[in-house]
Image: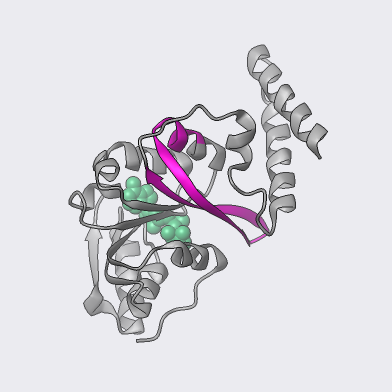
């Protein structure tokens, strides 16, 4: 078996996954992460799933070429609906929006009871996903920062603990990234996004005030 080379996002996700019997790669697309996990034995079995048949057949080809198809099950379907509760001890959801990841997790409340490891790389709106995780009783164990195609991404390792908290806006914006290599660059990117978001709040005085408070706080800390 020859594991495919992963980009930095997916390598960080693979590194965060604890060795397990079954891992699920939801929204697997090209299937490189699924093949990597199967080839390296990080997971004995990998469920590679996607909403669309096109990506799933690409994933099949990737796994065939890597020589690991015997250890990979390909499943067509929406989010975590392709899994039986508890079937996977680790689930990766990478490269979809925070909103889509939240919808997937909301539709599969069993991830709470099963204490499934969640490795999440939102393509957009990481602060929204952090807020949802914390408010819904998930804990972030770690975050890794990676730069891909000139953008910084946070790779999150989360699990349900039942201890919900109300995070501050600053906590949601930066998460656990502050001691990570790339923290300064990530912070600058997040500040720029916040400023852009603020410019769209001209007709929302309360939202504008809240964004201004956060901007003052972060610029004061810089
Ligand atoms: C941009 S690709 C990301 C591929 C890979 N995970 C990565 O991060 O490189 C997003 C993939 O998620 C799939 N997808 C989007 N919504 C989904 C859903 N609700 N359930 C399963 N797959 C979904 C898309 O079909 C697409 O193949």
Q: What stretch is highlighted in magenta?
A: 131-160
One can see residue 120 in this view:
yes
102 in magenta: no
Point out residue 121 in the picture as x, y percentages from the top left corner: 49, 52
155 in magenta: yes
Q: In this view, does 202 lie above or below 76?
A: above
One can see residue 58 in this view:
no
Q: Is the magenta stretch mostly helix, strand or loop?
A: strand
In the rendered structure, the answer to whether residue 3 lies left or right of residue 197 reads left
Q: Quadrant of ligand 1?
A: bottom left
Tell me what residue is drawn at x 37 percent, y 61 percent: 28
In the rendered structure, the answer to whether residue 60 lies left or right of residue 145 reads left
Q: Which of 75 and 222 is in front in this view?
A: 222
Q: Nearer the viewer, residue 125 or 76?
A: 125
Q: Is residue 182 above or below residue 188?
A: below
- Residue 202, quarter of the rendered image: top right
Tell me what residue is drawn at x 69 percent, y 24 percent: 211
Point out residue 39 in the picture as x, y percentages from the top left corner: 35, 79
In the rendered structure, the answer to whether residue 117 lies left or right of residue 213 reads left
- Residue 127, quarter of the rendered image: top right
The figure's colour scheme reads one colour
Task: Locate the C terminus and report the quarter of the image it occupies.
Answer: top right
Q: Is residue 42 above or below residue 142?
A: below
Q: Residue extending furthest left?
A: 84
Point out residue 22 in the picture as x, y percentages from the top left corner: 26, 64
In the rendered structure, the answer to whether residue 31 lies left or right of residue 214 reads left
Tell me what residue is drawn at x 36 percent, y 76 percent: 62
């Amino acid at each position: 078996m020859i594991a495919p080379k992963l980009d930095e996002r997916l390598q960080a996700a693979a590194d965060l996954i604890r060795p397990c019997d079954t891992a699920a790669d939801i929204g697997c697309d090209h299937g490189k992460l699924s093949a990597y996990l199967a080839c390296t034995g990080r997971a004995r079995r990998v469920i590679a799933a996607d909403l669309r048949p096109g990506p799933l057949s690409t994933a099949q080809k990737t796994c065939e070429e890597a020589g690991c198809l015997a250890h990979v099950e390909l499943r067509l379907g929406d989010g975590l609906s392709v899994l039986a509760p508890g079937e996977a001890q680790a689930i990766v959801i990478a490269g979809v929006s925070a909103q889509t990841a939240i919808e997937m997790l909301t539709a599969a409340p069993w991830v709470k009871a099963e204490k499934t490891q969640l490795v999440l790389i939102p393509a957009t709106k990481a602060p929204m996903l952090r807020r949802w995780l914390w408010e819904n009783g998930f804990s972030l164990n770690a975050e890794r920062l990676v730069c891909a195609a000139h953008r910084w991404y946070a790779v999150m390792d989360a699990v349900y603990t039942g201890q919900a908290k109300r995070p501050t806006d600053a906590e949601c914006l930066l998460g656990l990234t502050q001691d990570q290599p790339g923290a300064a660059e990530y912070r600058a990117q997040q500040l720029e996004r916040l400023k852009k978001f603020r410019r769209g709040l001209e007709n929302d005085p309360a939202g504008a005030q809240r964004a201004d408070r956060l901007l003052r706080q972060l610029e004061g800390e810089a």
